[in-house]
Image (spheres, rainbow, N blue to C red):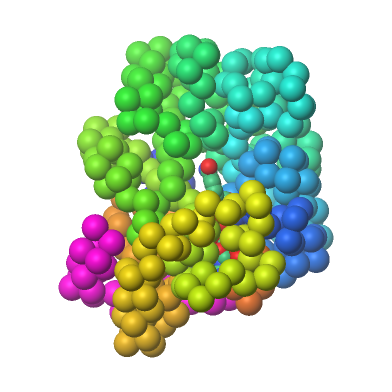
Amino acid sequence: MPYNRLGTAGLQVSQFSFGSWVTFGRQVDTGIAKEQLQLAAEAGVNFFDNAEVYALGRSEEIMGEAIRELGWKRHEYVISTKLFWGINGDMVNMKNTLNRKYLMQAIDGSLERLGLDFVDLVYAHRPDPNTPIEETVYAFSDMIEQGKALYWGTSEWSADEIRAAWEIADKRNLRKPVMEQPQYNLLHRDRVENEYARLYNDIGLGLTTWSPLASGVLTGKYLDGVPEGSRGSTAAHKEILGDARKFEPQIRELLKMAEKLEVSPAQLALAWVAANPHVSTVILGASSVAQLDENLGALVALERLTPELKAELDALFA
Ligand code: NDP
């Protein structure tokens, strides 16, 4: 497993990491989570992604339980959480916000559910136009000063918002955001490839990218119907079927290219994300142990993905 620096931070994260959105607490219980974490760790994965809002806190509890039952030592893994939506219902100040009160209480809740003294990475899960960026930067910086997190970053912030946060931190001698967590896959490329283009050199932004398979669409599993129990079969994620229909010709081509390379379509699509040098780690998602096993095989696809083949995929999904 290759490891990359997280932007300008000294921290190294595995080329492929593993996250728990939709799955932990809904499709995956602590037993399966343990098997998945073990499999990932054996493959060299050192980063595990989570968020307060995943299964309304249950995902953090399951990851914490699984890690304790596996007996992992704290120095053996990097773990994250993300804060923004809140899990206290409609309570004013505690939902859809990055205000100081919410952030300082939310990190304590996440640490309690994970059963940890600190997370390695904490993210502002979305931007909050109703809180001054300066207030948010102070809160994350203070979290780090208090030892509750080691690094902080953003998720789905605009390039301007990320730069504003970085500049405030620089000017005030606070902890700077070091990473962003954007969606990045063959179907969603603009932000990573264009909008953020200047940030890689200017502020050394690292990327931990999400939904590398566009929620499973790039496996080709939705080309001939909607498999029972799949993410696309649930009301909450119906929109992914639109992607499957819209990009059907390209996905069929992807299937053919994968067959020629003797890898699965999922492995080829994952390798394409990992081949972008700005991506520090590709966060994998899997609702079963078998899916994760297949997806970790993307390392083989990465070796077979020549610059020519990558360019072919770039053009196919331009
Ligand atoms: P993917 O795009 O890879 O989708 C994963 C889902 O696709 C699986 O749960 C499974 O769904 C299906 N799948 C995966 N592999 C296979 C396979 N080999 N064969 C068939 N089906 C497969 O990633 P996610 O959308 O799950 O995102 C990955 C991680 O990124 C999340 O866990 C989370 O940590 C992070 N994330 C962050 C966000 C943010 O806002 N910062 C937003 C979303 C995710 P099923 O079996 O149910 O069909």
Q: Is residue 216 visible?
A: yes
Name above or below for residue 189 compared with residue 172.
below
What secondary structure prevails in the magenta region? helix
Instruction: Please give the name of the residue rendered at 57% of the width and 27% of the height, measured from the top-left corner.
Output: 144
Instruction: Please give the name of the residue rendered at 40% of the width and 46% of the height, measured from the top-left corner.
Output: 207
Quadrant of the snapshot with the C terminus: bottom left
User: Who is closer to the viewer here, 172 or 233?
Assistant: 233
Residue 181 counted in the magenta span: no
Q: Position of residue 200 (x, y in %)?
A: 28, 40
Q: Position of residue 58 (x, y in %)?
A: 77, 46
Name above or below for residue 115 compared with residue 26.
above
Instruction: Please give the name of the residue rendered at 77% of the width and 27% of the height, measured from the top-left corner.
Output: 88
Task: Tell me: 60 left or right of 82.
Answer: right
Task: Tell me: 222 left or right of 269.
Answer: right
Q: Is residue 104 visible?
A: no
Task: Tell me: 6 left or right of 125.
Answer: left
